[in-house]
Image: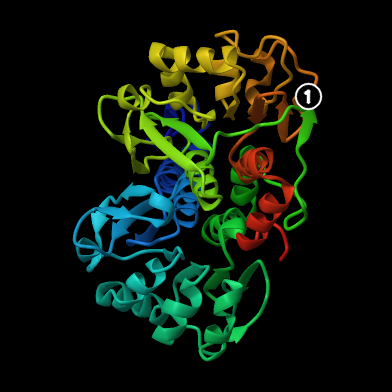
Amino acid sequence: MALVCHVTPPPSFLLPSKLRPAIPLLRKRFFSFSVSAAMASDAPAKKVLVPIANGTEPMEAVITVDVLRRAGADVTVASVEKQLRVDACHGVKIVADALISDCRQSVFDLITLPGGMPGATNLKNSEVLESLVKQQAANGKLYSAICASPAVALASWGVLKGLKATCYPSFMEQLVSGATAVESRVQLDDKVVTSRGPGTTMEFAVALVEQLYGKEKADEVSGPLVMRSNHGDEYIITELNPVEWTPHDTPKILVPIANGTEEMEAVMIVDILRRAKADVVVASVEDKLEILASRKVKLEADMSLDEAAQLSYDLIVLPGGLGGAQAFAKSEKLVNLLKKQRQSQRPYGAICASPALVLEPHGLLKGKKATAFPAMCDKLSDKSEIENRVVVDGNLITSRGPGTSMEFALGIVEKFLGREKAIELAKVMLFVHP
């Protein structure tokens, strides 16, 4: 709703006679000001289409949607499959807002394709999506893609001819036939933005915000993400009181989710740990398996928390998000699981709002160093390590926000499987320079 300040000129009889003829002009100018101010503040949100498919890389889809919605964009997540739910890579289940066929007549300010295989191929094979992207290009509007999709979809549709573009390293040869291939982490040329993989997605999404809304809005959005400034460098975790994390066999990890969970954090944790071959159980603390995350991405859990609570875990790790953390704190079953985990000296962890809103009030940070989302750190009783991006203290691991989630998940991989394995994964994802 627009807030319009109406200033009414004084009645003409209160003005000197020589100013009275100006009253109609004054009224016209004040009216014009009110209308234009209202129109400016009521400008419709930029419309964005993010198509998804079976085999889409979930980090690339969810980070892009989340960041664009933070900027105020009206994002439609559209499935190119016959149903709304897609089975993304690494067992992540995402529920779309619409089918791509529902978007056939729609007009978008941006169409942006996530990668992943066979997701990129499934996007390429969508005739409706191909038609929409070709129309977008013909109309001189913004379109973009990441990972495999610049080569597999955009180049094959002929919409990168004569333009500089980048993609996932193993698809660069394929890209060369339809574009001028470059190795940038994020590449802008004319109305096309391309990028390389999961580890470059947040930079890519912020670049899209800048193209839609300008640099000021991009900076405003990127600040609370707690992004790294040294993209591509090796990450660092701060470890105190080191102990061995020894899983029985394959690490079995519980990741609870709830309405209001930060979807980027949840998906990055699950995706990366499954890439490391961990046995990850995603459990809903709600009455339903489907949850509506913080930025309205719909995710589907593997099972309910009641079912998941019957099992034993090498690690329980909480994503953040204000609403999600509050739901976790109110879940007696989850809090009891965490307390048993601590008592049995098994690892547990949390990121963003969850260290402050779940672990701290339930005594799960007692005698421990931790960090949390910057605005929540005042709730921690021990603030001595809060400036670190990832803190490991014995069997506890904590971290700060969406922009530290990859380091957080890689820190968990490192603790269970070693630094070498974690760095190998980081390079595959292009979080660290190959």
Q: Is residue 389 left or right of residue 260?
A: right
**Which sits in the foreground, 341 or 173?**
341
Give how far across and how far down residue 56 sits, in percent: 40, 61
Q: Is residue 7 left or right of residue 243?
A: left
Give how far across and how far down residue 28 sits, in percent: 41, 46
Q: Secondary structure at mark 1?
A: loop
Give how far across and how far down residue 130 sits, in percent: 32, 77
Residue 434 vertical position relative to residue 179 in the rendered view, above or below: above
Q: Quadrant of residue 399?
A: top right
**Which sits in the foreground, 133 or 407?**
407
| Image quarter in which the N terminus is found | top left
* Residue topped by disc 1: 385
Look at the image and name its color scheme: rainbow
What amino acid is found at the position of numbered circle 1 in the picture? Glu
Q: Quadrant of residue 53?
A: bottom left
Image point 35% across, 60% down: which residue? 52
